[in-house]
Image (cartoon, rainbow, N blue to C red):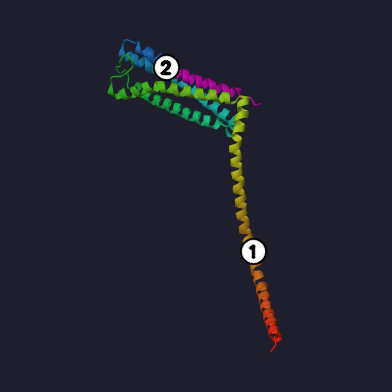
Amino acid sequence: MSERNTVAHFLHDAGLAAWFGGSLMGAVGVNGAAAEVDDPRRAAQVANTGWARWTPFNAVAIGAHLLGGAQLLRANRGRVKTQKGVLGNTNVKLALTAGALGATAYSRVLGQKVIDAGDVPVDADVNPRDPSVAKAQKQLKALQWAIPGLTGAVMASSALHEEQQRPSQVLRGSLQALPARAVGVAGTVGALASAKAVSAAHAAGPALEKTRAAAVPAVEKARERAASAYEIAVDKAKDALPA
């Protein structure tokens, strides 16, 4: 492609890297550090403070990734339509991104619920004994690994997109998509032809009816003449016969 999208690529890649790396570091580093705190109440405070400090930066990273991704999708919309495999990979990537966004937003809601609960007692693995936040913390323990898993899958899909932009892949994918596009074009042409034929039939209906109405008297007159000529021929044949 002749047009460069350097800024869009940077926003997309840097934002995704920060989203993935931040969530993974939080699961390993922040929660791991909190698990080493001797005071159970302080352990919860350490984990909550660490995640709260990261949240604004994570929001900026996600916004940058989405903005860059939207620009890249717009710039490559032609390949998405014409190159085989690109549309499928794009749909997978969009689904994974939506899942990561949902998991991130929900984890923030759960995290805020734990923060609002105050210095609740926790075990060494940052698992609260307080029933009011036990469920939220249990869900957070699962989401802390789901988010890097989903964002890592988005990175894998992005890597595949990069490979699909190789000139050889673009050529091969475009050629492979030609039969399907040809079938689609043929179907469209056939549908247009059928529609035109129906329209022509409707348009010709009044003309045909007018022609038929004009032809009926002529046919009737010709029939009457033929009948009269036949009767005359029969009479002459009778007169010609011997008595």
Percent position of residue 57, x then y = 47, 20
- Determine which quarter of the picture holds residue 197: bottom right
Query: Which quarter shows the N terminus?
Result: top right
The image's mark for residue 208 is: 1
Query: Which quarter shows the C terminus?
Result: bottom right
Q: Which kind of residue does numbered mark 1 sit on?
A: Leu
Segment tinted magenta in the rendering: 1-24
Task: Indicate left or right for 134 with 164 as reference.
Answer: left
Residue at image point 62% right, 50% down? 193
Percent position of residue 225, x then y = 69, 77
Q: Nearer the viewer, mark 1 or mark 2?
A: 1
- Closer to the camera in the image, 234 or 54: 234
- Verify whether residue 172 appears in magenta: no
Q: Earlier in the sequence, mark 1 or mark 2?
A: 2
Asked if the residues shown at circle 1 and circle 2 are in contact, with their CB atoms under 8 angstroms apart, the answer is: no
Outermost residue, bottom side: 243
Can residue 176 be spotted in the picture? yes
Q: Describe the element under mark 2 as helix, strand or loop.
A: helix
Task: Mark 1: give few (<14), some (14-19) or many (20+) Cα within 10 Å.
Answer: few
Percent position of residue 115, x then y = 35, 21
Residue at image point 60% right, 55% down? 198
Q: CA distance from mark 1 to mark 2?
A: 81 Å
Q: Kindly report the secondary structure that dominates the magenta region of the rendered protein.
A: helix
Percent position of residue 156, x then y = 50, 23
Which residue in the structure is indicated by mark 2?
26
Can residue 78 be spotted in the picture? no
Outermost residue, front side: 242
Residue at image point 61% right, 39% down? 182
- Closer to the camera in the image, 45 or 12: 12
- Closer to the camera in the image, 98 or 56: 98
Task: Indicate left or right for 153 with 120 as reference.
Answer: right
Q: Which kind of residue does numbered mark 2 sit on?
A: Gly
